[in-house]
Amino acid sequence: MYSRRKGRLLAMTALAIFLAAALQVEVSHSFSMAPPSGSSHAAAGTSTEECDVCIIGGGVSGLAAAIEIVSNSKKDTRVVLLEADSAVGGRVRSDVTEDGFILDRGFAVFIEQYPTAREILDYDGLELRRFLPGAKVKLRDRERLATVVDPLRERRAAIGTLTTPVAGVKDKARLLPLFATVLTKSIDDLFQMEETDSLSCLRERYGFSQDFVDAFFAPFLEGIYLVPLERQSSRMLHFVLKMIARGATSLPRGGMQAVSDQMSSNAESKGVEIKVSTKVLSIEQSGDRYSVTSESEDTSSRRINAKNVIIATDVGVAKNLLSRVEGLEGIGTLPDLSQRTVGCLYYAFKSPAPLLDPILLLNGEGPGRRSCKDFPVNNICFPSVVQDSYSPEGFELCSVSVLESALGSTEDGIDCEALDEAVRRQLAGWFPDFAADILDKSVWVNKGAYCIPNAQPSQFGSPNSANVFGGRPCDSFQGIGLPAGLLVCGDHTSTATLNGALASGVSAGRAVVDTRFGG
Ligand SMILES: Cc1cc2nc3c(=O)[nH]c(=O)nc-3n(C[C@H](O)[C@H](O)[C@H](O)COP(=O)(O)OP(=O)(O)OC[C@H]3O[C@@H](n4cnc5c(N)ncnc54)[C@H](O)[C@@H]3O)c2cc1C
């Protein structure tokens, strides 16, 4: 499972820490070295091609841009999408173990209410299964899990909510103005409200007690935005509460990867050429065209000349690529937009799960017993209880989210063995009837652990934070204008959500269509 070298494991490198012995992942490799028709060989190992639009990055923003362009342009428009990884999806990826467990690369949920997602995804095709609204909460010194449900949607459980020990009478009453705000205001209006940090918003604007904040809002919202409440935007707080109060959260049958797969199938069926395992190294401008140089898995290089280039990577890569374009060197001197790290551990075991409801379980034990070295868990869920495709028959899967503060990262990396043991101890305390199984590594088998260092860009308190619904203009990067034909999209230009990424991709695609094809 984990490396035996004193548990000192893999540094927080690019994507997953994949703990090899336990995990044999099937990753699709559609990498092909055959030169496409119309390409010419400039030198051995280097091919040069012409296309209309080159998109860099096959996360959901790049895929959305590609679909928008090919859906609104002439049939012979050539759109090429270059993706560095072995498959598309970016931060929306899943792995399937040899024995049939689906592991999303970090715990994520599909929020059905997202406006752009509703426009461009086929929900039926995703075969979504829903979480129960609300959450279970593990409170300090209480063995029984408490329940918080949304009384507006789960009327039968409303009595339970009123009697839940998570909130006192005053806090329950204060939920009304909060819900009234998010339900009656439009998304645009919510983003126009004065912005503050989420802790101040909850404590001062709505008057919630610190105990309720610690028990519910902190684990809930920190599990979404990956930083303490005082470093989260009140706009994002209102936005996500509106989305969750209005619609369901769910998991697709094929894991979160199904979202990316659906988009890439859609794009390819409309003619987009997707080249995976192709990492873009540089962009050069020459007249009104750009030359994009990339390196493939076997180190051969590819040059693509295009009139339009869309950079759809995370903010760090976008900054790096742009700052090396002649005339845009100033971008290199802009402050870095910080990115948040999150960890996720998966455990597989024989049915039944300790929690039989398809619901999120939050660590409401409060400071000192949440998101720290000895008590690393922020939230857990049993994805296979929500969507049975996540585990083979007769087995269940537990997903444990660990925030940056609890990963215990040092220069040597993360001590995964210590983390695993702390998680087991904590969960054994939560589920005493299952404690022996949870502590036994041959019964609750660690199927893998992920550490995602660029999980989300900062959404509050930094210049150009990702907290702008509708997105920033795609023809500039953090206020610096880009030359015609060079565009940028991705969650860092909008809100750091699936919806923000999709919306930013659609608007970059639209910009290309508008300028290139006359609207
Ligand atoms: C663990 C986790 C959980 C999340 N949970 C949720 C959630 O529940 N709800 C929600 O709304 N949002 C969630 N998010 C946020 C959401 O997933 C992201 O905001 C969104 O996927 C970002 O998409 P993107 O296209 O902007 O960027 P990315 O997904 O990062 O895509 C960028 C792509 O560019 C590629 N690339 C990078 N460099 C190069 C290069 N040089 N050449 C070619 N390609 C390159 C990358 O490999 C990647 O595929 C979560 C994120 C994480 C990490």
Image (tube, rainbow, N blue to C red):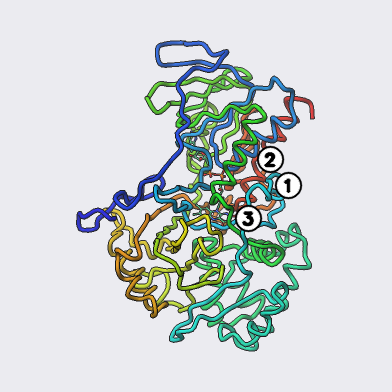
Query: Mark 3 or mark 2, which has the lower sequence index?
Result: 3
- Relative to 10, is 471 on the left or the right? right
- CA neighbours of label 3 inside 10 A, class few (<14), some (14 to 19), many (20+): many
Q: Give how far across and how far down residue 298 sits, in percent.
A: 37, 25
Look at the picture and state if 330 lies above or below 335: above
Q: Residue furthest left?
A: 5
Q: Residue at the location (63% across, 77% down)?
A: 204
Task: Between label 3 and label 2, give the one nearer the viewer.
Answer: 3
Compute the Cα span from label 3 to label 2: 23 Å
Above or below 56: residue 157? below
Circle 2: element type:
helix
Q: Pointers 2 and 1 in contact (CB under 8 A)?
A: yes
Q: Quadrant of residue 208?
A: bottom right
The residue that label 1 is drawn on is: 119
Amino acid on which the number 2 mark rests in the picture: Val
Q: Which residue is mark 2?
A: 506
Mark 3 sits on what residue?
128
Q: Amino acid at mark 3?
A: Leu
| Nearest to N terminus: mark 2 or mark 1 | 1
Count the labels in the image. 3
Label 1 secondary element:
helix
Q: Report the residue at 50% width, 20% height from top.
A: 303
Q: Nearer the viewer, residue 134 or 57?
A: 134
Callout 3: helix, strand or loop?
loop
